[in-house]
Amino acid sequence: MSIRLDRRAALALPALLSTAMLPRPGASQAGGGNLRIAMSANLRTLDPARTTTGEEYVYSNLVFNGLTRMREDQVVEPELAESWQFSEDLKTWTFRLRRGVRFHHGREMTSDDVVATFRRIMDPATSSPVRTNFEMVDGIEAADRHTVIFRLSYPYGGFADILTDRQVKILPADRIEQTATEPSGTGPFRFRSWTPGDRLVMVRNPEYWEQGMPRLDQVELRVLPEMSVRIAALQAGDLDVVWDLGPENIRQLREARGVRVESIATASWDAAIMNNRIAPFNDPRVRRAFHLAVPKADVVEVVLFGEGAPTHSPIPPTHPFFAGDVPFVQRADIAGARRLLAEAGHRGPVRVPLVIPVGRPVRERLGVTLQQMARPAGFEIEIQRVPFGRYSAEVSGKAPFYVDGYFARPTVDTAMHPFLHSRGSWNERLWAYGDPRVDQALDQARLTGDPERQKPFYQAAQRALAENPPGYFAYVMNFACAYRNNVQNVATHPMRWFDLRRGSVG
């Protein structure tokens, strides 16, 4: 079998070697203070395999580790796997695990834990939203105590990259069923308590496997639904970080004393989800008419105050795979939209409810903006407000029309395939979309690890999505956080979580 180092691993080789030479764990430093982060909503689960919200992702990336991780510069590097190799045909991937890494309850992590974690994620009964990302895995085996082999049914060059995703954190095989109530990970912070509606508290893991980390003594995720309350508490010094700062607040806080703001481009997106199984959106002409009625550039200005960009799909304009030759509607084509609606049998107004999430102000503003902008074309939209915490149970996959959004994924494949392939796990709970051209393009892109060969497939998918849209991708947005000036060595991550291993509060 021919073996070579993964392309991303090669980029990260200096980090890999320096980490491998670190002393044994047990020398983490206390005294970094208590970091208080304001979040907007409750966590609905403590089980990383089932997480679906940003608040949950922040928590899981502090308490758990994956085999690989993604830095703020989006380079993939080793985490619990100290190295990996793959066969020449990209179908056999071998991961060497770090030795001496212990779960928070004291037991050493081994390859059996990795196997159990991934078999559970791939089990449909687990209902993990990333299950479809691993449909190419034919088998997983523990070659020895610290070696895991993944055997794939087809070549997949980005396999190490998708192991950075939020839900694929390694759990202890002997305590998996306790994860939802007594989570035990290998991460830099240990779970201490969770009071719904108030806060989640994590404390420093004194036996963390990376030398000298973490410095913080404690991290609190505080639930404060109102942005105005979060900002006031930050300026008063009662909080240290506001996560997911609203675009309307960026300019205000940039001028505030004692506070710094970071706003960075990401591939996170918001959309008007149109259920393709339910009228009127089961007719693609209605979906196309909506696009003609609502220019995306105008939506970006009104909803995001310019802190984002229009897009055709989860692929952002900053990515080399973006189909720049596919035009956006620059001015509302009211006549064209009405003509399509008439062809679809709608001679009068198209009356449909639009559900928007209470507690997500940007998405609330998006819903109201779409309501107003679509009206001249004949869409009579009734706004219905539902608390975001009830979305998963009451709205997703059930409502004909609702506003939702999703964070950037670690690869283009994981951003596109689960959401837009007819068999995609996220697609099943969103628009129930199917287009053979999109399926074929996404399947073909998975068969090569060469970006130049992947690019035409992803661009073909975007062209098909423009002709037959699943819903209304409104934009990709910047992600912003605000920090007290005494917060040190913490950066805003494009994946919307935090790396707090080196962080401190001065």
Image (tube, grey):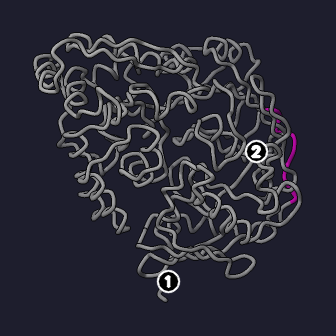
The residue beneath circle 2 is: 180
Residue for point 58% across, 18% down = 359
Residue 271 spot, x, y in % from top left: 39, 30
Disc 1 marks which amino acid? Ile
Residue drawn at 51 percent across, 17 percent down: 361
409, 176: nearer the viewer: 176
Q: Upstream in the sequence, badge 2 or badge 1?
A: 1
Q: Is residue 209 left or right of residue 125?
A: right
Does 79 appear above or below 201? below
The quarter in which the C terminus is drawn is: top right
* Left-right relation of 58 to 446: right
**Magenta span contains residue 445:** no
Q: Is residue 480 above or below residue 96?
A: above
Residue 134 at what x, y percent from top left? 51, 61
Residue 415 appears left or right of 473: right
Q: Residue at x 74, y 47 (%)?
A: 63
Place of residue 435 in the rendered image (x, y in percent of width and height, measured from the top left):
26, 48
Q: Nearer the viewer, residue 47 or 202?
A: 47
The image shows residue 450, relative to residue 126, as above or below, that is below
Badge 1 density bin: few <14, some 14–19, many ≥20, Cα 10 Å: some
Which label is found at residue 3?
1
Residue drawn at (30%, 11%), measured in percent from left and top?
Answer: 380
What kind of secondary structure does the magenta stretch mostly adopt? loop
Task: Give the quadrant of residue 389.
Answer: top right
From which residue to which does the magenta span run? 26-34
How far apart are the alpha carbons under marks 2 and 1? 39 Å
Query: Which of the 4 image quadrants contains residue 381?
Result: top left
